[in-house]
Image: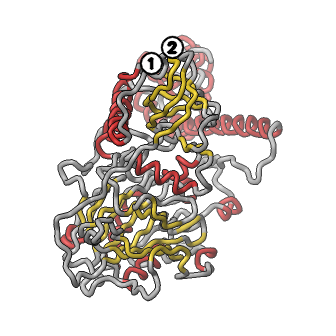
Amino acid sequence: MSLVTTESLKTELEIFDIPYQDDSVLDKMVEQCICNRLQAQEILHEWVAYSATKQGVKLTTDTLEQFEHEVTGPQILICITNYLLNIIKAEEEEEDLLDSYSTPAKGSQKRPLTTPERPHSKRTAALMASPSILLSPASFSPNATPSQKYSQRGGKGEVVATFGAVQGTRWVGRKDPGAGVQVEILEGPEDSLNSSYKYMFQRLRDVRNVLTEKIEELGEGLRTHFSIEEFSPVSLPAQDSITVLGQICCDSNGKLNAQSVLLEAGPEQGGQQVPVDLSELKEYSLFPGQVVVMEGMNTTGRKLVASKFYEAVPLPFYSSDMKMETDEEPLNVLVACGPYAPSDSLTFDPLVDLINVIVRDRPDVCLLLGPFVDSKHEQIEKAQVTETFENIFTRCIESIVDGTRSVGCQLVFVPSQRDIHHHFIYPQPPFSLPHPSKEQTQRVTLVPDPCTLLIDGVTIGLTSTDILIHMGAEEISCGTGSDKFSRILKHMLTQRSYYPLYPPADEVNMDYEKFQSFGQMPLTPDILVVPSEMRYFVKDVVGCVCVNPGRLTKGQVGGTYGRLLIQRSPQSEDGKRVSPCLTAQVVKI
């Protein structure tokens, strides 16, 4: 495109014999040509047509401004629209060309391109889901289409897993649920993660320091428990059997296997890595990040042939000086984990059903774990909601609090990495309510993920992160039985951490400095709640009752929730500990 000048405009004006006021008119026309991407001949043609409709108006700076407003302004919009249409057409041709070389998928993944001149067709609009589906605090969006699969589910209220003496148990709370029940974070407010924090400022040196301190702390516990004199450097050649301390890691970025195990020592033992030969071990269970002590031979300094494997030991349980009342009733605790809406609808019908269960059973405490506004929900992934995520979450909380007002139970809310409106960092700070009411302040407890709660003398460990799937994909074992869940849970308790895996799964954004302070177990909890996509269960693992209540919804169908009867129990006559979890069930919603 050639540059328009005053000389070229003067030539065109002489051709059409059009008089003009002065040279300022030529400057104004040059400006209009540059702004509107017009040539000298094109703007003169536009002016001739314009002046003919205005009874031969004179060419002055004032009339040029009017001309720009009425003619060249709309002209530039047409040019831009044509330009965008050409880009869209080129993109579509390029996508069609790429599609012709690819394997056909089930449905087209192409995003429909639209402009004001080319809107969606009626057929396309009918195929797309309506974006008007909202979560209503009173009726949970009656205009939305309820999930057909969820409403037609079977086995409502069916008990699918049990623990303890269930026969004859009445699943109701105390006469005055929630009254006098104390729910607090075990670490205390000053030591707990009670607000959001800055992240993405992590240095590799800081991560290394955290991992080193973990190796040293667990190593000291192992050395004391097994009466080990000292640990040898892992890469020092020795003709005798040596005892080494280190962290399990993989020799590549792939999945750990029996041939790819490395033992990485802390700085005190040389800080080096050595391959481990597991062939002489009859049984073992290992995962990346596990701190272990091994005995074996390392004659060359290049490979440790392990002959004995020392497993870490869990921390002691909580002990209270409070005396138990003889007529003290057990506490009824309900545990549920999101998502609280089926994947094909945002009507939150499962949450309504859960509120009805709470009103019917009248539990003393409800532990509700996220996600509440699930980032993996179909309509959220496709941006088909017309309300902010924060508003949807606030309505969820208000609906739960209002719907359970007649019960008066204590409500504990735990965030999830999948809560789209919240910080997806681990450890995760607690939710915040913008303007909490007096009732919310009295009945609602907002806690971080993970945390350890103290409820009437009973400790409950909580994490909404799916550690079972993450560790299950990395753990290797031999000769330890087929119960993978029990092995993973035992690793959590013996490694004294809510997330002992290193490196973490891709979806977990770990802040190691906060993790060192708030991601460790201060003691072995009486009850450990670990919701997962894996099958629900209730198990006793080294004295800790571990519960996976499942998720309240599984895709488009209903899921499960858990319920526990707990009671602070005194020491038995023979000094053995008695579990405070009397009985537990997992129930279909």
Q: Which residue is mark 2?
A: 6
Residue at image location 46% in from the left, 40% down from the top: 310
520 and 372: which one is in front? 520
Q: Which residue is mark 1?
A: 27
Relative horizontal placement of residue 439, taking residue 157 as reference (left or right): left
User: Dot 2, crowdedness within 10 Å: few (<14), some or many (≥20)?
Assistant: some
Q: Is residue 105 above or below residue 586?
A: above
The extreme top residue here reads 7
**Proximity of marks 2 and 1: CB atoms separated by less than 8 Å:** yes
Residue 323, image quadrant: bottom left
Q: Is residue 531 above or below residue 411?
A: above
Residue at image location 60% in from the left, 45% down from the top: 477
Residue 81, image quadrant: top right
User: Dot 1, crowdedness within 10 Å: few (<14), some or many (≥20)?
Assistant: some
Alpha carbon separation for disc pair 2 and 1: 7 Å
* Residue type indicated by callout 2: Thr
Instruction: Give how far across and how far down residue 242 sits, in percent.
Output: 47, 26
Between discs 2 and 1, the one toward the N terminus: 2
393 and 80: which one is in front? 393
Can I make out residue 346 in this image?
Answer: no
Residue at image location 63% in from the left, 36% down from the top: 257
Relative horizontal placement of residue 383, taking residue 433 as reference (left or right): right
